[in-house]
Amino acid sequence: MASTESRDNEEGLGEVVAQHYNNLEEKGLEKRTESRIFYMRNFNNWIKSMLIGDFLEKIKDNKVDGAEVKVLDMCCGKGGDLLKWKKGEIDYLVGADIAATSIEQCQSRYDDTWGRGGFNQQKRFGAQFITADCTKERLKDKYVKQNLQFDLTSCQFSFHYSFESIAQVDQMLQNAAECLRPGGYFIGTTPDSNEIVKRLRASDSSKFGNEVYSITFPGEEKLPLFGCRYDFHLEDVVDCPEFLVYFPLLERMAVKHDLKLVYKRRFDRYCQEKIGEGGNRSRGQEDSRQLLGKMQALETFPAWEGGELVGKQEDYTHAQEFLRSQQDDRASNQKLGTLSKAEWEAVCLYLVFAFQKTESRGVKRSLEDDS
C-alpha cells in the first residue's frame, strides 16, 4: 500500500485540505468568543465585508436599474459570506467548495435563513451550492442555470491552494473568469508571498511565527514557482498545507482568461485606506470605522473592569505608547480599539486583490471579421 505522502504526491493535496475542513468543528458564538484569535477573525471578516461591499457598489453603479446581480463564490466553505451577499442585495449566488460537509452546512444555513419560509423573504436570493474542487473541475458544467453570466467572482482565503500546479491555477482562473461578464470583477484574499518569504529569510530556521500562527517550510533553499508547499497553523482555524502564490506570475496567467489586475493591497494598508486618519476622514471612512466596532473587529485596551486581554500584556506595548502620547490633555482612563501584536503579525500576512474582466479576445476577433 502506498504511503500517505506518496498518495499526496500522486493525487495532490486537495483531499487533505477537504478532509481538514470537513473535520473542522462548527463552533457556536460563545465558543468563538473564547478563541485567542476572536478579534483577528472578526477583523478578517471586516476586510471581506469592505472588499465585497466596494465591488458590489461598483457593479451596481454601472448597471441598469433593476438588472440582476449574480455572484460566484468559489471555495465558499460553510457559507460565512451568505449574510454579506444578503446585505449586498444580490439576486443569485453559486457557491462551490471542495469539502462536501461544508457545502451541506452552507445549504442548511441558506435554507434555514431564506428557504422554506425563512424570514425576510423579500430579500431572498436564489442559490445553487456545488461540491467541487475549483482547482481541478470545470464549474460551468455543473451550473443548474444554463448561460449564467456573473457580475462578481469571489474567492476568500483559498486561492493559494490552486498554486500546487500550473494546471490547477489555470483551472481556477478559468472558473473565475469563464462566466464573468466583461467589466465584472474577480476579487479575493490570499497570503502575501513577499511577506512570507521575507519572514522566512529573517528567521534562523525553516519555521517562524508566534503564539497564534506558525509557518513551516520543508527546509529546501530553492522556492519553486508552483508547488511551493508550506505547513500553516492558525490557532483554532487552520492546520494544513498551503502553497505560495507568486503574484506576478498569477497576474501574467490571468491575461489568458481576459483578467486584468486593477487593485492589490496588503491588509494593513487596505485597512488604513478604508478608515483614514484623524479628522481627515470622509463619510465613507467614518462608516467603515463604525463597522469595525459593530463587528467587534478590535479589542478594547485596557480591558474593561473585570475583563481580560486575549494576549499577554507585552503584546500591547504599541497601544500603551499611543495612549501615553494622547494623554497630555485628555483623561487618563482613555481606551483604544486594537489587536494584539501576535494577531496583527498574522493579519499582515494577507492581501486583497481585484481583477477586472476585459472584453474577450474572441469577441474582438468576431467584431473585426464582421467589419
Image: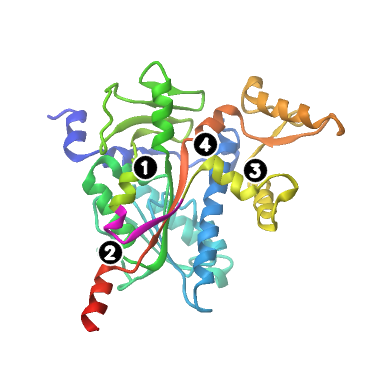
Mark positioned earlier in the residue sequence (3 or 1): 1
* Magenta-drawn segment: 254-263
User: The residue tagged with tag 1: helix, strand or loop?
Assistant: helix
- Determine if the magenta segment contains residue 206: no
Residue 235 drawn above or below residue 126: above
Q: Which residue is mark 4?
A: 347
What is the number of the mark on residue 22?
1
User: The residue tagged with tag 4: helix, strand or loop?
Assistant: helix
Mark 2 crowdedness (10 Å alpha carbons): few <14, some 14-19, many ≥20: some
- Residue at image location 34% in from the left, 37% down from the top: 244
Residue 68 left/right relative to 334:
left
In depth, the one of 78 and 222 nearer the eye is 222
- Determine if the magenta segment contains residue 255: yes
- Residue at image location 37% in from the left, 48% down from the top: 101
Kind of residue at disc 3: Gln
Mark positioned earlier in the residue sequence (4 or 3): 3
